[in-house]
Image: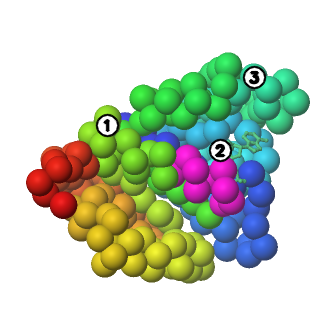
Amino acid sequence: MKRLCVFCGSSVGANPAYSEAATTLGTLLATRGIGLVYGGGNVGLMGVIADAALAAGGEVIGVIPRALADREIAHTGCTELRVVDSMHTRKAMMADLSDAFLAMPGGVGTFEEFFEAITWTQLGLHRKPCGLLNVAGFYSPLAVFIDQAVSEGFIKPVHRAAIVVDDDPARLLETLSTIDLPDVPKWIKRDET
Ligand code: AMP
């Protein structure tokens, strides 16, 4: 894995464990020579992970829409800051630059970005694994909900397997680098229902 796209909150959240995990992950990426691709902000967990990766000598590419950059909330210390015209361009560019996706704790912005990345993997638009860093159990209820969608017949088990949930950043990185994604696109034939 050359570059990891990390989606994370524009807030730091209520538990200091979230910032600690962002620092750990940012440092880990830098020491392993894995570039960080992220939303380009200097606020919340986004700012924490970027600062940690940069402090440890890592490559950090921020991709930020002009409207956010103009409000002076872009991180000016990134190795590279790409200013784009829209949120849609941003997500497509973040996906193109990365080999895998990981979501740290965050809010609806983080969820939306992560679910789009999973959807593109399911549809075969790219073949990149997606991980949830389950800091302090933050994503446990979501993992249960996703499993319910599997048992209720809305998500195929093969697609569920492409979503890795782990509370340990190093192990999650290892799994994302080595996972063998099944080549099963989502398209369902009419006679398969
Ligand atoms: P949330 O998880 O709801 O906090 O949203 C995180 C997402 O909000 C980011 O990935 C961005 O799309 C967007 N966002 C909000 N504030 C900023 C900011 N200051 N810089 C960059 N992106 C931001």
Question: Mark 3 Cα within 10 Å, few/some/many (few <14, many 20+)?
Answer: some
Residue 58: quadrant of the picture: top right
Left or right of residue 119: residue 179: left
Taking the image as shown, residue 103 lies to the left or right of residue 87, namely left
Q: Quadrant of the C terminus?
A: bottom left
Q: Amino acid at mark 1?
A: His
Judged from the image, the quadrant occupied by ligand 1 is top right
Label 1 and label 3: CA atoms lie apart by 26 Å
Q: In front: mark 2 or mark 3?
A: 3
Residue farthest to the right, as pictured? 71
In the shown orientation, is residue 105 left or right of residue 42? left
Is 170 situated above or below 35?
below
- Residue annotated with mark 2: 50
As drawn, the residue found furthest toward the front would be 191
In the rendered image, which residue does mark 1 sit on? 126
Please give the name of the residue rendered at 30% of the width and 43% of the height, measured from the top-left corner: 123
User: 96 or 174: nearer the eye?
Assistant: 96
Give yes or no for contact between labels 1 and 2 (Cβ–Cβ under 8 Å).
Answer: no
Find the magenta span and give its range: 106-114
Task: Pick whichever, 57 or 186, lies toward us.
Answer: 186
Q: Which image quarter holds the N terminus?
A: top left
Q: Which residue is mark 3?
A: 66
Mark 1 Cβ inside 8 Å of ligand 1:
no
| Label 2 residue SS | helix
Whole-percent x and y of residue 152? 33, 76
Q: Position of residue 56 (x, y in %)?
A: 59, 46
